[in-house]
Structures are given as structure tokens and as C-alpha cells.
């Protein structure tokens, strides 16, 4: 019998679970309850080292793990009109925005960036569920359009990480208008012949699922992610029936043909590189944590679209 595993660790977990956890040192796994040191957790991309539970990760931390050397360039997103409906519930909309900005350190619910993954140039966008539930408002619509336009301009694939509770109610019909706007943005990529890969993370629901999150060429999900339009409790109350075990979870959707892959977060980068290069018709890449591209490599990438355009113009002559 391993007394450390069977007695000491459970005892430590029990003691810590009754104490107030320091926010900056330890994190308790939501699934198994194990106390995880913050460096151990962040080093594993916020995946529990004991049970494999995937915890929340910010877009910035995700990009630092995704891009070579953790280096990426943010893509500018046009700022929309602030509080166009002058919405107020228990708090005014601007007050909720300020609270979310203070909590996350970000200006809005989506981050767009460009860079290299295993020397494969891409554009990426990621939602932050901790920012007002990752809700889709005018800014998120602008962000996806900006990401698609940048991808078309640079002739790069777009990889999108979705995480949202749906449309942002404080923006009313203006938030719902982002569904057709983002659908048009995806169509721009398809007309340009560029891959659009969606990674659905927990949770992806509502109008986000009904628009850009399910329009990809390839759909990947993290384990046990909730992916749906209406949640299981709403459906059960409507049809008055008990739903199957694991209904609307990633593995259930994979079994029923709604997803192409379910991949653990630490293995996601290599999977994305393989799929992206295959869709772009490129040879296999060197996998692993590569350093940031050199200035010469970045300059060559920047000149590539112009050189290709010049070659096509020469062919037409």
C-alpha cells in the first residue's frame, strides 16, 4: 500500500479544502478537489495534473502557449459605440463593462492576434468567458471580422477558440446582428480558399454556437466541453424527459458526428499545426516548443503575400 497516495495526500486535500485558499498560490480543481500549485497548473496550461480537468484559461495565456516563443502581435479591432441602448438592469451597462475590465485586465471579450505556430503563420482569435460570460456583442463581431480580413490580407488560416454564453443581452438586437455579420466574415475566408478551424471550449452556447462557432472547416473541442444552443436543463423542462448521460458534451457530439476531434489542451498546438499545414498543402512541420521567429523570418513572412501577388500578375502578362 502506498501510504503517501492513500492517506497523506487525501488528508492534505481535506485540510486545505477547509481553509481559505490564497488566490495567487494555490488553485483547487473544480472536478477532483486537488490543491494545485499555481506554477504547476500554469505550466500545464491550466489542466489539472491529477484528473485532467480543463480549467478556464485566458486568451492571452492561451496564445502564449500556442505561438512560438509565446510571441504574437495583437490585431487592432475597431471599437464600437459604447452602450447604444443605454441599458440598465441592476447595474448600468458601462458599470458592468468596467467591472469586467478590472477583473480580467482586458478591454473586451475577444483577443485577436497573428504569429507563428511551429513556423506556420496563422491568425487566431479567442474568447474570454470570464469577461461577461464571453458574450457576443458588437466588439466580438468586429473582432471576428478584423481577424478574417487580416487572414485574407496575409493569406493565412484563421484559428478561433470559442467560449461564450451567447449574445450579450445589454446590446439587444445589435448583439444578435453579429450572427449574420460573423457568418459573412467566415464566408470571406471560404471564398479566399483559406482554412477556418474552430476550437470549441467550455462552454460554447447560444448564438455563438448558432453562428461562427459551427461554421469551421474542422471542429475540435477540449474534453468535456459543453457545446449547445439551449442548455440541457432548458431542454429537459421543455420536453419533460431525462436526457442521455453526457448529452451536449464534447465526447457525445464527437460520437454523433458534430465534431472532428476532441483534443487535450497540452496536445492542441501539435494537432492544430498538423491540420493547418495539411489544409494549406504544406509539408510537415517540426513539432514542439520552438523559439520566437527571428527578424529575418518575420520579414520573409511579411513579404510573402506581396511576392505571391507579383508572381500572379507576371503570369497574367
Image (spheres, helix red, strand yellow):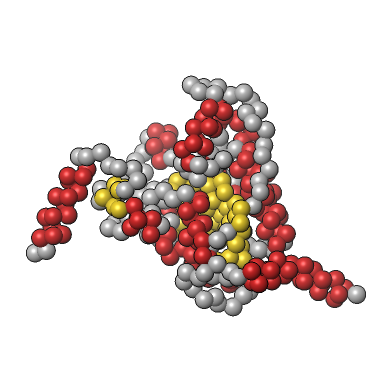
Q: From this viewpoint, which residue is outermost toward the bottom?
A: 283
Query: For residue 150, which quarter of the picture?
Result: bottom right
Q: As drawn, which residue projects farthest toward the front? A: 295
Where is residue 82 drawn, in percent x and y? Answer: 64, 31
Please give left or right for residue 269 compared with residue 158 in the image.
Answer: left
Task: Work out whether 277 lies above or below 72.
Answer: below
- Quadrant (top left/top right/bottom left/bottom right) for the C terminus: bottom right
User: Which of the pair 233/266 is nearer the observer?
Assistant: 266
Figure quadrant of the N terminus: bottom left
Q: How many circles with numbers are drawn on the protein?
A: 0
Q: Residue at x 42, y 35 (%)?
A: 234
Q: Give the side of residue 28 with respect to residue 230, left or right.
A: left
Q: Image check: 308 left or right of 40? A: right
Could you say where residue 287 lies in the image, as x and y percent from the top left?
49, 73
User: What residue sits 44% from the left and 50% below the top?
Assistant: 57
Residue 183 visible in rendering: no
Q: Nearer the viewer, residue 156 or 243?
A: 156
Query: Measured along the vertical axis of the image, is residue 239 above or below residue 25?
Result: above
What x and y, as percent, mark residue 215?
59, 53
Hey, which quadrant is residue 159 in on the image? bottom right
Q: Which residue is at 52% across, 37% downward?
A: 101
| Depth order, front residue of 173/48 | 48
Query: Residue 125, position in %: x, y?
Result: 58, 52
Report if residue 283 is visible in the image: yes
Q: Is residue 15 above or below residue 174?
A: below
Amino acid at each position: 500500500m502506498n501510504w503517501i497516495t492513500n492517506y497523506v495526500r487525501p488528508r492534505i486535500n481535506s485540510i486545505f479544502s477547509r481553509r481559505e485558499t490564497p488566490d495567487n498560490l494555490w488553485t483547487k480543481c473544480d472536478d477532483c478537489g486537488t490543491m494545485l500549485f499555481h506554477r504547476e497548473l500554469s505550466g500545464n496550461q491550466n489542466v489539472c495534473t491529477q484528473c485532467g480537468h480543463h480549467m478556464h484559461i485566458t486568451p492571452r495565456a492561451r496564445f502564449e502557449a500556442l505561438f512560438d516563443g509565446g510571441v504574437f502581435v495583437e490585431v487592432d479591432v475597431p471599437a464600437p459605440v459604447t452602450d447604444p441602448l443605454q441599458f440598465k438592469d441592476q447595474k448600468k451597462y458601462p458599470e458592468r463593462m468596467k467591472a469586467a475590465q478590472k477583473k480580467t485586465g482586458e478591454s473586451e471579450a475577444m483577443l485577436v492576434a497573428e504569429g507563428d505556430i511551429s513556423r506556420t503563420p496563422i491568425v487566431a482569435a479567442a474568447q474570454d468567458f470570464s469577461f461577461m460570460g464571453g458574450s457576443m456583442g458588437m466588439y466580438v463581431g468586429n473582432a471576428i471580422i478584423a481577424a478574417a480580413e487580416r487572414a485574407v490580407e496575409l493569406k493565412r488560416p484563421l484559428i478561433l477558440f470559442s467560449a461564450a454564453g451567447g449574445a450579450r443581452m445589454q446590446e439587444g438586437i445589435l448583439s444578435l446582428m453579429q450572427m449574420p455579420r460573423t457568418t459573412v466574415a467566415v464566408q470571406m475566408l471560404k471564398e479566399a480558399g483559406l482554412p477556418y478551424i474552430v476550437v470549441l471550449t467550455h462552454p460554447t452556447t447560444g448564438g455563438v454556437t448558432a453562428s461562427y462557432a459551427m461554421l469551421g472547416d474542422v471542429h475540435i473541442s477540449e474534453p468535456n466541453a459543453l457545446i449547445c444552443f439551449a442548455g440541457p436543463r432548458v431542454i429537459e423542462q421543455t420536453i419533460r424527459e431525462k436526457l442521455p448521460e453526457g448529452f451536449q458534451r464534447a465526447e457525445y457530439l464527437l460520437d454523433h458526428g458534430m465534431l472532428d476531434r476532441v483534443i487535450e489542451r497540452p496536445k492542441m498546438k501539435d494537432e492544430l499545426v498538423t491540420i493547418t499545414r495539411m489544409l494549406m498543402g504544406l509539408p510537415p512541420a517540426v513539432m514542439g516548443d520552438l523559439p520566437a521567429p527571428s527578424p529575418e523570418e518575420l520579414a520573409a513572412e511579411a513579404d510573402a503575400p506581396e511576392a505571391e501577388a507579383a508572381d500572379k500578375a507576371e503570369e497574367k502578362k
